[in-house]
Amino acid sequence: MAGRVEELLGKPRSAWALGDLVALVRDQGMRLVSLLHVGADGWLKTLDFLPSSEAHLRAILTAGERADGSSLFAGVGISAAASDIVLRPRLETAFIHPFSPLPTLAFLCEHRGRDGALLPESPQTIVARAHARMLRATGVDLWAHGEVEYFLGKKAGEGDVYGRAEQGYHATAPFVFGETLRRQAMGILGDIGVALKYAHSEVGYIEAQQNDGRIWEQHEIELALAPLPDAADAVVLTQWVLRCLANQQGFECRLDPMLQRGHAGSGLHFHFSPRRAGVHLDCMTPEGDVQPEAAWLIAGLVRFGASLMAYGNRVPASFERLAHGKEVPHAITWGRFNRQALVRLPVLPRTEDGRSVVPATVEFRLPDGSVHPHLLLAGVAQVMLAGREEGDIDAVLERSAGASAGAATSKASTAGAVPRSFQEVAVCLARDRDVFERDGIFPRSTLDAALRTLGLGDAAPLSH
């Protein structure tokens, strides 16, 4: 389905030109232009303009505006003495702002340095370069999508008709109160150009407790496959839309990996699909062997998945989820269908004659809602290339293979354990940092900053 701007312009976003967007602002009576971008912390930032003329609007859209890089990228090598960077709108990302009180056209931005080149420290630059490196080195165009799980909370009241603890999976109204908000979010995401797969309520219903008084229910919006940079943007926009809607309607939206020990935690699983020449590749042969591209990815994820936690599991509750949550990976294993494996190959829906109707994917089940999606997905591309370079991929897959279904037993018991602290993640990242730095994809200063953050120990690296 086309987004709202595509419908108004009558052409796909890949064909939008400056004149199209200037005309849209004029014809739709847009008052503001909003430049959105992702900083080093993974949060969405905003810079707003009230264009005074068409010439002013054109200047904003073609040149962008300067910003303080030392504030946006604190600790990653941009000093206050030379901190100017430039935000430049990516015209193909334009959407009508769904929450602005005035008609507003919004854009996602890239970051550029004083020399006009893409800023190496920018998360958008890092994931775009990692994606391009994969394509250049292998001919593989790696696509991904995230499963955005979240908790929605409200005060318990008289007349509430809801379900029981851990019984929320695929529940429908009136047994969930968040169904309407979830559907509103789906409509808004479609309007702003974020493609979706589906959405539903999740298992993690938490009844009101004496010390809280709120009912918590869990929901999920599963996004559609997209190139790595677009997949990262989609996660950030989805989390933003959910939080804005919840704020408007008096709910609390939480992306915490764990709200209560023993209950279902919220992951943010990512699915990956390698493509060649515009065609999604199978992960398995008809004989049941892993295809080469999927093998590179699985090998990379089981070898370097612990280091990826620096960008996929960034709060103390991340480790609480891994220790006490349900259907979470405990050991560094992979398997077909197994929801307790670090990496799994999900079942594919098929027609009666056996044809698959969706691309096959490799699912990475370790990240959670604290994720920095741009840096995580860039890291996945880097470790997939490292997996390709393994001398004996078959041996790596054999050593890390868990059970194909059910509990991760047998071989899983001899596999390495998933890290349980920031310090353990830091050790892994320090050991593997050369994989991330190859071809200059992750700047040294970005990895140095991650290691310093992980060294905070029991303190939260980031509030999310």
Image: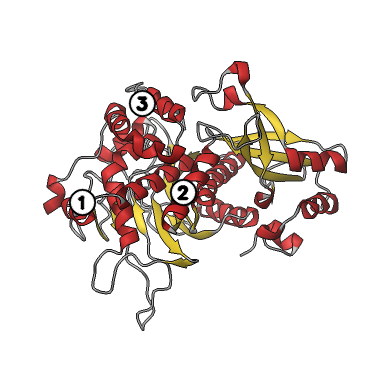
Going by the numbered disc 3, the residue's amino acid type is: Leu
Q: Residues within 10 Å of mark 2 (few under 14, many from 20)?
A: many
- 283 and 422: which one is in front? 283
Q: In what quadrant of the picture does the N terminus appear?
A: bottom right
Taking the view exactly as shown, the residue that stands out farthest to the bottom is: 353
Q: Are marks 1 and 3 in contact (CB under 8 Å)?
A: no
Q: Is residue 242 above or below residue 74?
A: below
What's the residue at 42%, 51% (across, down)?
162
Image location (x, y in percent) of residue 32: 77, 40
Which callout, 2 or 1, points at the residue further toward the start of the chain? 2
Image location (x, y in percent) of residue 221: 48, 53
| Residue 62 in which image quadrant | top right
Q: Are marks 2 and 3 in contact (CB under 8 Å)?
A: no
Task: Identify the element where label 1 is drawn.
Answer: helix
Image location (x, y in percent) of residue 222: 46, 55
Q: Is residue 454 above or below residue 416?
A: above
Task: Estimate the spatial distance between the alpha carbons at disc 2 and disc 3, rounded to whole Å.
Answer: 27 Å
What's the residue at 81%, 41% (across, down)?
57
Image location (x, y in percent) of residue 443: 46, 32
Which callout, 2 or 3, points at the residue further toward the start of the chain? 2
Q: Comparing marks 2 and 3, which lies closer to the viewer? A: 2
Q: Comparing marks 2 and 1, which lies closer to the viewer? A: 2
* Residue linked to disc 1: 396
**Residue 291 appears left or right of 396:** right
* Residue linked to disc 3: 454
